[in-house]
C-alpha cells in the first residue's frame, strides 16, 4: 500500500529563494533540466508526491509551496497574487543559478505557469499545461486569454513570437503527436486515436496526419525509417 512517505522516499525537502523563502520537495538533483511544479489554490508541494520519483528520472523536479501556502513565507497579502507567484518561480530559478526552466502547474498553478511564460518568455523553455491537457476540447482564444489574464491579441502575438507558430498550429501539432503516440502503443485504432485527440472527422484527421508524418495513420506503426517521426 502506497503512502505519502513511500511516494516521497528519497526526495529532499529544503528551502530555496532569495526574495522569498520557498519550501521545496526535490528529486533528480543531478539532472541539468529544472522543472518547477506548482500546486493549486489552497494546496502544497505534496500534491505532486506520486509524480516526483518518475519526474526525477528526467528532470531536477522541484515541487513548491506557493507563498501564503504551506510552509513557504507569508509576505503582506495582495489581491494581485499571480504576479507575486510568478516572481517566486523566477526567484527559485535565480537561486538555482539558471536562466531557463520548465514549469508545470495544476489549477492556480497552471495560471501561474501561463502568466510567467507570457510575461517572462525569455525565462521559460516550455509550459506543460493548458493546451496539452485539453486536446479533445481545447479552449478558444478568448478563454485562454481570460485564463492567463491578458487580451487575445497580446496572447496571440506573444505566443507566435516565442514559438514561431500560431496557437491553432501548435494545438494541431500536439494533437497529431499524441495521436501518433496512441497508435504506436497498439492500444488504439485509427478512429479511437482520432476521437481521443478531438478529431470528429476521420478524413480530416487522416489528411492532417499524412501532412505531418508522411504516411496515413493506418500505416504509421509500420512506417519506414525515411518517414517523419516525432
Image (cartoon, rainbow, N blue to C red):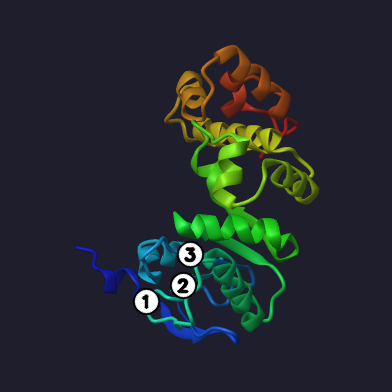
**Residue 168 rendering spot, x and y as whole percentages:** 67, 33
Q: Position of residue 141 (x, y in %)?
A: 62, 37
According to the picture, the residue beneath numbered tag 3 turns out to be 38
Hey, which residue is sitting farthest top in the picture? Answer: 203
At mark 3, the secondary structure is strand
Q: Is residue 163 left or right of residue 3?
A: right
Instruction: Please tell me whether mark 1 sits on a helix, a strand or a loop.
Output: loop
Disc 3 + disc 2, Cβ < 8 Å: yes
The vertical placement of 187 against 11, above or below, is: above
* Residue 209 visible here: yes
Q: Under tag 2, what secondary structure?
A: loop
Gap between marks 2 and 1, in whole Å?
7 Å
Q: Provide the residue designation for mark 2.
A: 66
Task: Tell me the CA gap for discs 3 and 2.
Answer: 7 Å
x and y, in percent, of residue 204 in the image: 62, 16
Q: Which mark is residue 70?
A: 1
The numbered dot on residue 22 is none
Q: CA distance from mark 1 to mark 3?
A: 12 Å
Q: Nearer the viewer, residue 214 or 91?
A: 91
- Mark toward the start of the polypeptide (3 vs 2): 3
- Please tell me whether residue 225 is drawn above or below residue 100 in the rendered image: above
- Please tell me which residue is depicted at 71% across the width and 29% down the height of the picture: 212
State if disc 1 and disc 2 touch (CB < 8 Å): yes
Amino acid at each position: 500500500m502506497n503512502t505519502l512517505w513511500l511516494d516521497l522516499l528519497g526526495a529532499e525537502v529544503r528551502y530555496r529563494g532569495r526574495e522569498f523563502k520557498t519550501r521545496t520537495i526535490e528529486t533528480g538533483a543531478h539532472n541539468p533540466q529544472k522543472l518547477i511544479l506548482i500546486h493549486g489554490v489552497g494546496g502544497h508541494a505534496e500534491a505532486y508526491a506520486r509524480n516526483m520519483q518518475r519526474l526525477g528520472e528526467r528532470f531536477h523536479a522541484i515541487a513548491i509551496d506557493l507563498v501564503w501556502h504551506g510552509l513557504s513565507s507569508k509576505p503582506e497579502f495582495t489581491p494581485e497574487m499571480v504576479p507575486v507567484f510568478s516572481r517566486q518561480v523566477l526567484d527559485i530559478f535565480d537561486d538555482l543559478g539558471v536562466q531557463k526552466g520548465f514549469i508545470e502547474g495544476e489549477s492556480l498553478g497552471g495560471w501561474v505557469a501561463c502568466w510567467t511564460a507570457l510575461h517572462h518568455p525569455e525565462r521559460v523553455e516550455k509550459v506543460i499545461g493548458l493546451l496539452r491537457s485539453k486536446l479533445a476540447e481545447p479552449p478558444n482564444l478568448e478563454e485562454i486569454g481570460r485564463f492567463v489574464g491578458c487580451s487575445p491579441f497580446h496572447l496571440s502575438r506573444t505566443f507566435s513570437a516565442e514559438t514561431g507558430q500560431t496557437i491553432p498550429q501548435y494545438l494541431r501539432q500536439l494533437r497529431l503527436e499524441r495521436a501518433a503516440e496512441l497508435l504506436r502503443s497498439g492500444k488504439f485504432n485509427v478512429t479511437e486515436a482520432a476521437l481521443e485527440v478531438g478529431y470528429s472527422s476521420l478524413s480530416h484527421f487522416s489528411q492532417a496526419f499524412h501532412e505531418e508524418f508522411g504516411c496515413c495513420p493506418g500505416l504509421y506503426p509500420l512506417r519506414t525509417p525515411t518517414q517523419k517521426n516525432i
